[in-house]
Image (cartoon, rainbow, N blue to C red):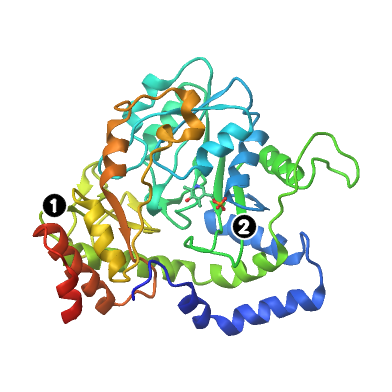
Amino acid sequence: MIPLCDLKQQYLAIKDDVDEAIRQVLAECQFILGPNVKAFESEIAEYCGCPFAAGVGNGTDAMHLALRALGVGPGDEVITTPFTFIATTEAIGIVGARPVFVDIDPVTFNIDPAKIEPAITDRTKAILPVHLYGQPCDMDPITKIASQHNLLVVEDCAQAIGATYKGRKVGTFGDAGCFSFFPSKNLGAMGDGGMVVTNNPDVYERVEMLRRHGGKVKYHHSELGLNSRLDELQAAILRVKLRHLDLWNDYRRQNAYRYNRMLAGTAGLTCPAEHGSDGTFIPTGEDQPQNNLLRCVYHQYTLLADNRDDVVAVLKDLDIGCLVYYPVPLHFQEVHVNLDCRPGRFPVAEQVARCCFSIPMFPELTEEQQSVVAAVLKRTVADGEDGRSVYAAA
Ligand SMILES: *Cc1c(COP(=O)(O)O)cnc(C)c1O
């Protein structure tokens, strides 16, 4: 069995430090907005290279509170991608705004900047790019369009903590950056957690107030907030893990390039590619691609195959971790029927949703495990044969 993501192995490697951090919180009994949340907020702000960070209950609330803090609300439109997790549009909907989709780039699966401008109306208030699978969106054209049209930019960085674009960390390009510490993310808590980072002190102050019932002074409430604070125990655990994040992301990158090499040239299979420094795409199969534009942190290693459903069935059968992120683009979700998006409206997202699948990706993944996965894939995808025999031999 090869898991998609191995949280137990990660815990065992840092068990003493994590256990000690938990023990200290228990000894202090300062469970709500205690010293670890405060310290972790400073550490994340420093890590991202921006002045402010506010810990919240989860990544969805991070976006919801960031949008509210920025004054996005009823009547406003927010431009985003249809190929993401539902949390992205949930946050937009919860503040009363309307998601407006634009199609994705066929190579990176991120929002296609060239398609943003035609979607802008006089109700557009913000652009919400999602750095999917750990690859930064092409931020230069996005921020340029935003400033030309006087739009806010809120980044969904749930899958991309530590990723950089032109040497700058994701989350710091616009008005707010939103992180999730869901256990399986690159920096995962042992429960839920989230963070808003911002360069704007007003946004920080508003998020900080809204996350604890909307008042500056205890028991004095100026507006309806909610209860969404980063938990002190989670902050203590995350502080331990943050020290390892860069190394873990390096291992993810190494594993991605190793998959690229192992799978290069397999007919019928498309490996992930990185948007490169000259605007072209760094092809798969390169040893260590030179990429001066961005650093992708491979939250997922996601491929395309025409016979995706067969491939997924074979991998599942062999107990090899495999998931389809995401089988249904958001414009086809029942919850969004009111947006009235007919099939064919976002053809790239629809096609990718039909063919994509993600295979085991975590820092501790071994070369041996990767070669088993690669061998099964090559056989199943390329020859249309059943890869089970390869697995039996391995
Ligand atoms: C995980 C995730 C979120 C939401 O994070 P939670 O902490 O689970 O609320 C938002 N957007 C994307 C793209 C995600 O992958």
**Which quarter of the rendering shows the C terminus?**
bottom left
Q: Does 73 appear above or below 175?
A: above
Name the residue carrying label 2: 193
Determine whether the residue tagged by mark 1 lies in a helix, strand or loop: loop
Residue 89 shows in the view: yes
**Residue at x 59% of width, y 48% of height:** 197
Front one among 154 and 276: 154
- The image position of residue 141, as x and y in percent, is 37, 33
Residue type, mark 1 in image: Gly
Determine whether the residue tagged by mark 2 lies in a helix, strand or loop: loop
Quick one: which residue is furthest to the top in this view? Answer: 122
Q: Assess mark 1: CB under 8 A from ligand 1? A: no
| Disc 2 crowd, CA 10 A, few/some/many (<14, 14-19, 20+) | many
- The image position of residue 18, as x and y in percent, is 61, 78
Name the residue carrying label 1: 268
Picture mark count: 2
**Residue at x 16% of width, y 81% of height:** 393
Q: Does 348 appear above or below 306?
A: above
- The image position of residue 61, as x and y in percent, is 63, 45
**Residue at x 65% of width, y 66% of height:** 234
